[in-house]
Image (tube, rainbow, N blue to C red):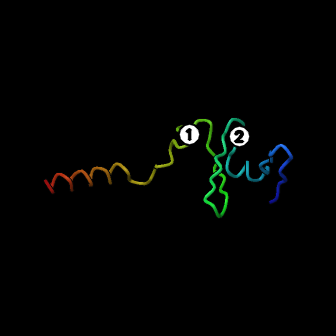
Amino acid sequence: MHTTVTKRGQTAVPAAIRQHYQIQKGDQLVWIDDGRQITVVSVPADPIRALRGRGQGEGLVERLLADRRQERNRE
């Protein structure tokens, strides 16, 4: 996909990308320049709400408890 930068430095995010990454009005885009390429990262208006439920099924509580047991056994 291609976009054009206006003389004011503006560009549009293509609709297909907005839909796929659920970019909505109020979301911010962070531009990361590592000297070789530019990466654009979407930051939702409410990042906490956007992450809600992402860790389900990962067994995070069980892993945390296992780590704590290991630490206690080392002491």
Circles 2 and 1 in contact, beta carbons < 8 Å: no
Residue where numbered disc 1 is placed: 47
Left/right of residue 24 with respect to residue 43 in the rendered view: right
Mark 2 or mark 1, which has the lower sequence index?
A: 2
C-alpha span from label 2 to label 1: 12 Å
Residue found 60% across the figure and 59% down from its top: 34
Q: How many marks?
A: 2
Residue at image position (65%, 50%) is: 31
**Which quadrant of the figure has residue 44?**
top right
Can you say whether 56 is above or below 28 in the image? below
Q: Amino acid at mark 1?
A: Pro
Q: The N terminus lies in which quarter of the figure?
A: bottom right
Q: Nearer the viewer, residue 53 or 73?
A: 73
- Asked whether, in this view, residue 45 is left or right of residue 11, the answer is left
Q: In this figure, which residue is indicated by the disc labeled 2?
A: 24
Q: Left of 48 or right of it: where is 61?
A: left
Q: Secondary structure at mark 2?
A: loop
Residue 22 percent coordinates (x, y) = 68, 46
**The residue tagged with tag 1: helix, strand or loop?**
helix
Provide residue 15's location: percent of width, then percent of height.
Answer: 79, 49
Mark number displayed over residue 22: none
On the image, the x and y values in percent for residue 51 come to 53, 44
